[in-house]
Image (cartoon, rainbow, N blue to C red):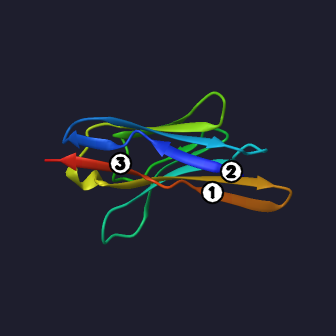
Amino acid sequence: QVQVVESGGGLVQAGGSLRLACAVSGNIFSFDVWTWYRQAPGNERELVARITSGDATYYPDSVRGRFTISNHTDKNSVYLQMNSLRPGDTAVYYCNVVALADGLRYEYWGQGTQVTVSS
């Protein structure tokens, strides 16, 4: 059974940094796309960063230049380095992984990790 576990959240002052980690276990195939999402109370879930198996990355304007997503060399973990954090970055951060195999799409979510940025 595939498990996705996020870690690294916490409380930080504005301007500070955090590094989130997402680790996957129990998979029998490699994942093609890793995405970090976040959701603040009362808001819709929004994409924060994405990386593909080919190391292509994508960031929305709201975090570009401040956040960096990267793959671990074992390809079973991904990181999100968050710098220059703002109170508006406060949210629960979720890791999403997608594998495309045998014509099927496999998608898994973690339970999320809370990030709180104080002003």
Q: Residue at x 63, y 57 (%)?
A: 108
Q: Amino acid at mark 1?
A: Tyr
Q: Which element is circle 1 on?
A: strand
Toward which corner of the image does residue 38 lie, by quadrant?
bottom left
The residue pinned by badge 2 equals 2
Q: CB under 8 Å between callouts 3 and 1?
A: no
Q: Residue at x 38, y 56 (%)?
A: 92
The residue pinned by badge 3 equals 63
Callout 1 environment at 10 Å: few (<14), some (14 to 19), or many (20+)? Answer: some
Among numbered discs 3 and 1, the one appearing first in the sequence: 3
- Total tally of numbered discs in the picture: 3
Toward which corner of the image does residue 15 lie, by quadrant?
top left
Q: Position of residue 104 (x, y in %)?
A: 80, 62
In the picture as drawn, the residue positioned furthest to the right comes out as: 102
Q: Which element is circle 3 on?
A: loop
Q: Residue at x 63, y 49 (%)?
A: 3
Among numbered discs 3 and 2, the one appearing first in the sequence: 2
Q: CB under 8 Å between callouts 2 and 1?
A: yes
Q: Amino acid at mark 2?
A: Val
The residue pinned by badge 1 equals 108
| Residue 95 horizontal side relative to residue 100, left or right | left
Q: Position of residue 52 (x, y in %)?
A: 62, 45
Q: Position of residue 109 (x, y in %)?
A: 57, 57
